[in-house]
Image (cartoon, rainbow, N blue to C red):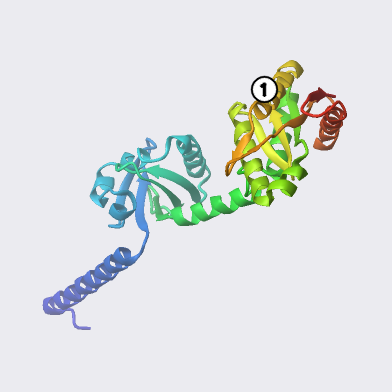
Amino acid sequence: MDDTPETQSDATTQELRELREKAERFDRFTRSLPAMLYDYIINHDGISHCLYCSAYSLELLGIPPEDFLADMDRFWNLIHPDDLTRFRELDLKTNREEVTFSMDTRVVLASGKEKWIRVSSKKNPPQGDQPAIWSGYMIDISGTKQLELMLQEQATHDALTGLGNRHYFQRHFRDELLRKDRYQRDSAVLLLDLDHFKKVNDRYGHDAGDFVLMRVSQLVKAQLREVDVPARWGGEEFCILLPETTLDDALAAAERIRAGLAREPLDYQGEAIEVTASIGVTTLNADDRRIEPVIKRADAALYQAKRDGRNRVAHG
């Protein structure tokens, strides 16, 4: 075997050439990939230190890779305040259990622009006594997230009024049952039905009927608190969940809504359309476990208001 200095020098030159070629291929790959790639270690004090960051960090997060190499906190400072606690908890859990980290989170860039990104990293097998290297990527999922939120909105909200639909209301009702049982606080449900709504459609047309439903939704919502949950129950019926509300307070809220609707006609293309509503009120009992009995009581109260002459509030 030829082991002369010249041969060794040629071999070394060849190895260096191959390493440069590999580095150049990797650099081209990372620059063309719409993802931020990175490596980092966690030292014995639990502090993360970035070893490598691809150039896409500038396009994704507005920060050049050398800034992440100098200070990984540059990323932590971008995480949306509402997501930061959950991100830190998952990060600690992942490090402790040595499992793959994966989370969708919002970041707020220096420009003020908000993005949704997917962050994923995995621990590589450690080499000797050296700290293990974690390898990961970040990608922009803002478009996907917007579509996801739009589909979720369509699945849980009424397209005409923008209020929640039955599914949305039922989900919040289940949550309220759990809170009621835990904290022993009162809650109430209102069931509202527009009086003689069919006459609006018959006289003015269905476009006018849609206008009334949209305007009523706005007026009802304006009378509610942020924590209250209004929903279009079906047709001209609306259901409203009032958390932490006594019967007296629920009756007062129902009366404000009723009076607000009856106060003045709605102006539709120069036509004055009078709108009134009958409202049934009920509170959640200690033994309520399902929504059906609650709605049944509210419905019975609603029809009592109808029998008493409409444009009224009744409770049951």
The residue at the point 30 percent across, 41 percent down is: 110
Query: Picture coordinates of residue 199 (x, y %)?
Result: 76, 43
Q: Residues within 10 Å of mark 1 (few under 14, many from 20)?
A: some
Q: Farthest residue to the left: give it.
A: 6
Q: Is residue 128 visible?
A: yes
Is 151 on the left or on the right of 107, as rendered? Answer: right
Disc 1 marks a residue whose amino acid type is Arg
Query: Picture coordinates of residue 132 (x, y %)?
Result: 40, 49
* Viewport quadrant of the N terminus: bottom left
Q: Farthest residue to the top: give it.
A: 248
Indicate the quadrant where residue 232 lies.
top right
Q: Secondary structure at mark 1?
A: helix
Query: Picture coordinates of residue 88 (x, y %)?
Result: 46, 37
Is residue 194 depicted above or below 51 in this figure? above
* Viewport quadrant of the C terminus: top right
Query: Picture coordinates of residue 275 (x, y %)?
Result: 70, 34
How many numbered discs?
Answer: 1
Is residue 12 depicted above or below 229 in this figure? below
The residue at the point 73 percent across, 35 percent down is: 239
Indicate the quadrant where residue 166 lies.
top right
Is residue 212 depicted above or below 187 in this figure? below
Which residue matches tag 1? 256
The residue at the point 50 percent across, 44 percent down is: 94
Q: Farthest residue to the front: give it.
A: 270
Q: Is residue 157 visible?
A: no
Name the residue nearer the viewer: 187 or 276: 276
The residue at the point 46 percent across, 45 percent down is: 105
Name the residue nearer the viewer: 215 or 21: 215
